[in-house]
Image (cartoon, helix red, strand yellow):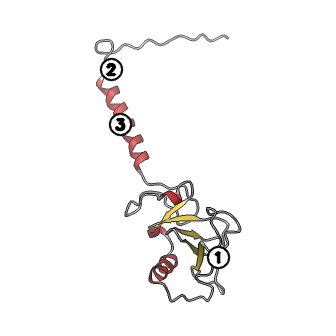
Amino acid sequence: MVSRYVPLKFRWSRSPGRAPSRVLAGLLVVLAVLLAGCATGTSTGTGAGTSGGPSSAAVATPGWARGMATVPESRLPPEARRTLALIDRGGPYPYSRDGIVFGNYEKHLPKHQRGYYHEYTVPTPGSRDRGARRVITGQGGEFYYTDDHYDSFRAVLR
């Protein structure tokens, strides 16, 4: 059996060239939904602690964080927020290796001269050692968070 294509003819209830109000209203609803979806502050991050929607305080992405995963400070684990507060105060730090130069050997962060980055421990509850979580700071005011011992980073939006 062969099927034939039969074009459908639409008849508007109003004069030609003017769409019915229901169709126009539907298009406006679709447009509003699309615009609302574009306006939410989602990030490109993955994993726990990344932004999946707007944060309590919208923070613009700084130039140094463009193109990488981000996380608002408010979405970090409480231990990471406490580490950031210690960094802001200048210490004292609980671990002797806090504040040492971070070499960026994995090259996941933008390239800079040695000494540009420094690392700080983010305690991991239940861990017997320093754990895998760190905050890395840059001399230009950058803050990065890793929870997998330098395999990936998220720019911290403050």
Q: Is residue 25 left or right of residue 70?
A: left
Q: Residue at x 53, y 10 (%)?
A: 6
Q: Residues within 10 Å of mark 1 (few under 14, many from 20)?
A: some
Closer to the camera in the image, 100 or 46:
100
Amino acid type shown at disc 1:
Ala
Q: Earlier in the sequence, mark 1 or mark 3?
A: 3
Residue that mark 1 sits on: 132
Tell me the distance, in whole angstroms, between the alpha carbons under discs 1 and 2. Answer: 60 Å
Residue 100: horizontal and vertical position, in percent? 62, 81
Which residue is drawn at the image coordinates 48% and 84% (left, top)? 90
Query: Which quarter of the rendering shows the N terminus?
Result: top right
Q: Is residue 45 above or below residue 10?
A: below
Which residue was labeled with disc 2? 19
Decide which of tag 1 and tag 2 comes sooner along the chain.
2
Q: Which residue does the image show at 64% across and 68% down from the upper left?
A: 113
Relative image position of residue 149 (x, y in whole percent): 66, 72
Q: Quadrant of the C terminus?
A: bottom left
SS of the residue at dot 1?
loop
Q: Nearer the viewer, residue 109 or 151?
A: 109
**Tag 3: amino acid:** Val
SS for tag 2?
A: loop
- Please report contact status of discs 2 and 3: CB closer than 8 Å, yes or no: no
Tell us which disc is closer to us: 1 or 2. Answer: 1
Three-letter residue code for mark 2: Ala
Residue marked by disc 3 = 29
**Crowding at mark 3 (Cα within 10 Å: few <14, some 14-19, many 20+):** few
Residue occupying the far front of the picture? 113
